[in-house]
Every structure is written in structure tokens, then in C-alpha cells.
Image (cartoon, rainbow, N blue to C red):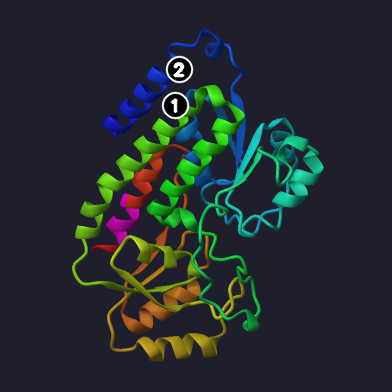
């Protein structure tokens, strides 16, 4: 952890120290929709940005409403960093419209959606069933550290477009974040023995398969965002009976349906935080270790 912070400090010190004009440059206000996006903004932007996060770490970003405080932050922002892929569709467009900040319009340098530089994992649900299906792909990219690395570099490029004098520092900070994450992943993967079978409440955990030896074999939900009925839960239990596995869900999702499945199968159940407690790299590193601590027991 100290090595990562030192690497970022050195990157910004070397890149920024020679320029007296840069020392007087105003800091950019970045409004991030979620704590994970705040991690990207604060880690890559360093001393050149102030960061405001709109969604608390224990809230579901699907289900919020636009609030006056959100609108006030967006009105003053130089850049908004959203997840995109319809995650915030229920409230962010309305908040941006009310803020009436021309810098944050889609297509402007001040609007950045993390999903845009990525080829997202497709939804695992049949759109014909209805519910909150992610037609643009699974937006829960923060559950994949490799995806967060890609977003960090893309965001460094965007910040460089807004503050070109700091471009070397932004890219160096993204590289330090990448090095810190990649150095952790082999040891985290090695804590698993055989591949772990997961039944998840929702499809966000599909991203675990990109960096951990896990397989997502079913969902507590039948339709995304819709409480499951007893017939679906009965079918799920029968499909998994006699096999080993683990039930996972987000800490803000209803536990009763998942608990029924876990009790019937004799499987452990883990309600996991999906967002870091604070919008900084150290908290994100602690979050991915928390995921592995829970699953690799």
C-alpha cells in the first residue's frame, strides 16, 4: 500500500514540479457517480482534481432518484465520471438535465462513461422475461480489477484532454494503479483450491469469473430486479441439490430468497459489499481482498 502511494506521489511530483504555471492551475472538479468511479477519479487525477461521489457505498445505483444535492454538484463540475451502460439511467439523465451544465453533455469532454472503452460482459438474463435487463451489457465492471485498470488508463486520456499540461502525471498514476492491482491478483487467485461454483442473487458477480477461479451457475432472481417467486426458487434448489457451492449477493439486496436457497442446499451465504467504503485506491484494494476472504474460506 505504501509503495503504491509513493509511486503516485513520485509520478505527480516529477511531472508537476517543473511548472510554476501548473501550480497555479485550478483543480478540476470531478463528480463520480459511485465510489468505484471515485477511486478512478481520485487515483488518476491526484492533486489536480477534487472529487465528489454521488452514491453512498451501501446504496444500489440502479434505484436512486435525482436529488437537489446531486444537481448542485453537477452544476459546478468540470467532468462527470459515470459507470454508464444504463446503470444510472433512472436518475443521472434527470440530474444532468436539471444541472444544465454544458460541460457535462454527452459527447463533450466533460462527460465520461467508464463502460464506453470496454466490451462489457453480456447479460445472462433472457430479455423476453422482462425485468431490469441490461441491454448494453453488464454494467458492474468494478467487480473486475482488470476492467478497472482499463478504465483508469482511458480516464487518464480524458483528463489529459482537459489538462494537457498534467498528461504525464495522469498516465503515470494510472500505470501505478495498474501495477498495484496486477501485483495482488496472483496471490488472491492462489487462495482458491478447486473452482468455486456460485449462485448469485443478480448478475453483477459474473465479473468474478474474469479474475478468480469461479463459475456462476445460477441466479436467485428469475427476472433482474424482480423478487423471485417460489416456483423459481424450487427449480433452482433442485438443479443444484447434491452439489457444492456458495450463495452470493450484494449487501443491499434482500436476503430472504437467497437464505432459503442456502438453507435448503446447506451452502454458505455471503452478503458482500460491492463498493469501496471510501473513494480511494486503498479502499478498493481492501474491497477485493474482502471478496476473496469471504469466498476462499
Residue 221, image x and y in percent? 53, 77
| Residue ID for mark 2 | 16
Q: Quadrant of residue 271?
A: bottom left
Q: Quadrant of residue 50?
A: top right
Question: Is the Cβ of the residue at disc 1 closer than 8 Å to that at disc 2?
Answer: yes
Q: Residue at x 37, y 25 (%)?
A: 11
Looking at the picture, tell me which residue is in the foreground, 103 or 296. 103
- Give the structural element (helix, strand or loop) at label 2: helix
The answer to whether residue 73 is left or right of residue 83 is right
| Residue ID for mark 1 | 169
Q: Quadrant of the N terminus?
A: top left
Q: Is residue 35 above or below residue 121?
A: above
Residue 290 on the magenta segment:
yes
- Residue 157 shows up from this direction: yes
Q: Label 1: few (<14), some or many (≥20) within 10 Å?
A: many
Residue 252 on the magenta segment:
no
Q: Earlier in the sequence, mark 1 or mark 2?
A: 2
Q: Residue at x 44, y 26 (%)?
A: 169
- For residue 34, the mark is none
Q: Quadrant of residue 115?
A: bottom right
Q: Residue at x 60, y 34 (%)?
A: 30
Residue 215, image x and y in percent? 34, 73
Write down the region rendered in magenta: 289-294
Amino acid at each position: 500500500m505504501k509503495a503504491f502511494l509513493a509511486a503516485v506521489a513520485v509520478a505527480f511530483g516529477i511531472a508537476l514540479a517543473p511548472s510554476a504555471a501548473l501550480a497555479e492551475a485550478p483543480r478540476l472538479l470531478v463528480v463520480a457517480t459511485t465510489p468505484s468511479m471515485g477511486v478512478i477519479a481520485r487515483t488518476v487525477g491526484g492533486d489536480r482534481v477534487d472529487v465528489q461521489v454521488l452514491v453512498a457505498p451501501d446504496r444500489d445505483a440502479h434505484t436512486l432518484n435525482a436529488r437537489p444535492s446531486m444537481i448542485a454538484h453537477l452544476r459546478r463540475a468540470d467532468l462527470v465520471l459515470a459507470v454508464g451502460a444504463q446503470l444510472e439511467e433512472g436518475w443521472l439523465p434527470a440530474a444532468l438535465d436539471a444541472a444544465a451544465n454544458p460541460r457535462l453533455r454527452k459527447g463533450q469532454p466533460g462527460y465520461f462513461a467508464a463502460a464506453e472503452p470496454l466490451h462489457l460482459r453480456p447479460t445472462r438474463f433472457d430479455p423476453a422475461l422482462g425485468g431490469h435487463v441490461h441491454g448494453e451489457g453488464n454494467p458492474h465492471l468494478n467487480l473486475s480489477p482488470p476492467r478497472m485498470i482499463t478504465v483508469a488508463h482511458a480516464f487518464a486520456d480524458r483528463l489529459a484532454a482537459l489538462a494537457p499540461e498534467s498528461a504525464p502525471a495522469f498516465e503515470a498514476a494510472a500505470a501505478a494503479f495498474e501495477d498495484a492491482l496486477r501485483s495482488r491478483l496472483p496471490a488472491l487467485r492462489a487462495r482458491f483450491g478447486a473452482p468455486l461454483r456460485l449462485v448469485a442473487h443478480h448478475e453483477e458477480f459474473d465479473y468474478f469469473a474474469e479474475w478468480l477461479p469461479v463459475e456462476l451457475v445460477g441466479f436467485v432472481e428469475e427476472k433482474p430486479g424482480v423478487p423471485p417467486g417460489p416456483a423459481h426458487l424450487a427449480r433452482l434448489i433442485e438443479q443444484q441439490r447434491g452439489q457444492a457451492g456458495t450463495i452470493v449477493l450484494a449487501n443491499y439486496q434482500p436476503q430472504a430468497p437467497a437464505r432459503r436457497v442456502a438453507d435448503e442446499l446447506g451452502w454458505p451465504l455471503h452478503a458482500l459489499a460491492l463498493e469501496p467504503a471510501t473513494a480511494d485506491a486503498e479502499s478498493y484494494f481492501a474491497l477485493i481482498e474482502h471478496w476473496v476472504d469471504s469466498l476462499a474460506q
